[in-house]
Image: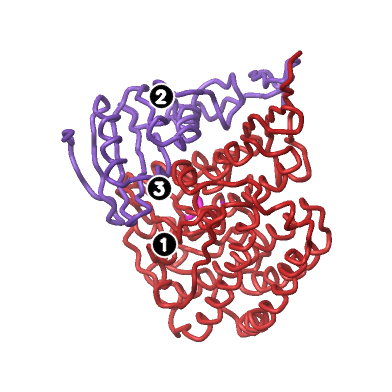
Chain colours: A purple, B red
Amino acid sequence: MIPIESESKTKDGTPVVYISKENLIPFMKEKKDEGYDMLLMVTGVDYVDHLEVVYHLLSTKDGRRLLVKTKTDEEVDSVTGIWPGANWHERETYDLVGIRFRNHPNLKRILLPEGWVGHPLRKNYPMDKKQYVNLGEDGEDKVSYDPKEGY
Amino acid sequence: MEKVVEVNFGPQHPSTHGVLRIKVKLDGEIIVDAQPVIGYLHRNAEKLSEMGLYPKALIYMDRLDYVAALNMELGYILSVEKLMDVETPERAQWIRMMMVELNRIASHLVWLGTHGLDMGMLTPFFYCWRERERVLRIFDEITGSRLLYNYFSIGGVYSDLTPKGIDMIKEFVNTFPDRLEEIQSIFQKSYIYAKRTKGVGKLTLDDAIAYGVTGPLLRASGLKWDLRKNQPYLFYEKVNFDVPVYTNGDVYSRFLVRVEEMRQSTKIVKQVLEKLPDGDFYNKKYAKPMLVRMKGSGESYVPTESPKGEFGVYVIGDGSTIPYRVRIRSPSFANLQAVSIMLKGYKIADLTATVSSVDPVFGEVDR
């Protein structure tokens, strides 16, 4: 058994489990064997003093749901080896919240262009600073603060 | 000599249903690798929702899946109501259920029409648009808008059904099944359509589950999984309907699943009209000026079955009038990820059939 840090419930009655980030991968493997065969989404939450990753699990056999939460400081192990569908969800979490996933096969930005500065879903992201995107000569997006260099 | 050629499909291409770009690696005509590139319609609805009051985020939900805006609103409203412990009158819930089913029909009709276009069939497009127009006129009569409704509110709906609206719905559900039969026969009697879709874009059940694929794609791959039946919300356990399941997992099965779903939705709307109780259409405790002062704390996620799959909004509240974190689980995002498996080994000509069978709507993929 992998030690659980604490347990609670969401308002709609789904159980929540807190797990330390060292135990994340063995815990997730255990849960997959218990029947949680689908990973619905990966969420990053910025609590200012720490970041949190939330995994929504679902068992398509009996309809059980589970939320797994882990506290982190920008880096956590990737679960793509357990659920291949985690690939894009982790890329999105990296893109928007800035949590790096170790051993991820292709950890690049997915929604924002490569080269974007900052992660928008952080609470300290400067909302008044505009960034302009333009297509470079090599076909990749270029990002700049100068309005003349993009749209 | 290098045999594999890399080709860009999109982002501006008529059959990508929006701004999807696929990097395809081709060996002759065979697809070796296909990687979807997304993000061209990104507006960050999650951040925008975190910047305003709870009721204000609703307009961003409308703009996710813009062909099924009410289904998107429903996912957010149910989560927020759980977060705030708001009770909804029965009549409001029945109205919501009916409107959502009508919108499911409209969304599937958009898919069916454009899917026909991708297959080189121009005729069904006009038939589908004619039927969808009737649904949009019903929405125009009841909600006041044709595409982006902002109709559901915390604790109910913004306006009651009008007698004229009910007549229009009755007329629609009575005539629609026959016309659907007509549209379906255009597809099914076409030898070319069957040839181009049967056995194309196959997705096995194991792959579908591993990649988090939900909705019609999952049901076409052989799993009877519909949240309306398996984890009912609103009053779905009180109405009678079937969940279509096919086991082939190809484009043709997805077509059959969606057509059958439209028929079942019509059945649900008919039953709602019979069972619709009298009463308030919104909770009188939460009148419109009150809504902006509503506070939420804790976290909640209510999964709903949108036309594309499991849709839900994970909302975290910190006890203030502004949501702390809003996370949108969009079905098309997960479904689109599986496109690279569906395409591997097929010919480049099958690409449009497969991509359109996923039914991606880019407002929802890119958020």
The residue at the far top in this view is: B1
Q: Nearer the viewer, residue B64 or A130?
A: B64
Q: Are marks 1 and 3 on the same chain?
A: yes
Residue under pointer 3: B314
Circle 1 sits in a helix, a strand or a loop, which is it?
A: helix
**10 Å crowding of disc 1: few (<14), some (14-19), many (20+):** few
**Start and end of the magenta stretch?**
B55-59
Q: Which mark is residue B87?
A: none
**Vertical order, A82 against B294 (above or below):** above
**10 Å crowding of disc 2: few (<14), some (14-19), many (20+):** many
Magenta span: chief secondary structure: helix
Identify which residue is drawn at 64% across, 53% down. B251
Name the amino acid type tagged 2. Phe
Q: Position of residue B258 (x, y in %)?
A: 61, 62
Circle 3 sits in a helix, a strand or a loop, which is it?
A: strand
Marks 2/1: CA distance?
43 Å
Q: Position of residue A34 (x, y in %)?
A: 27, 45
Marks 2/3: CA distance?
21 Å
Residue under pointer 2: A101
Q: Position of residue B152 (x, y in %)?
A: 51, 64
**Vertical order, B103 against A43 (above or below):** below
Q: Quadrant of residue A44?
A: top left
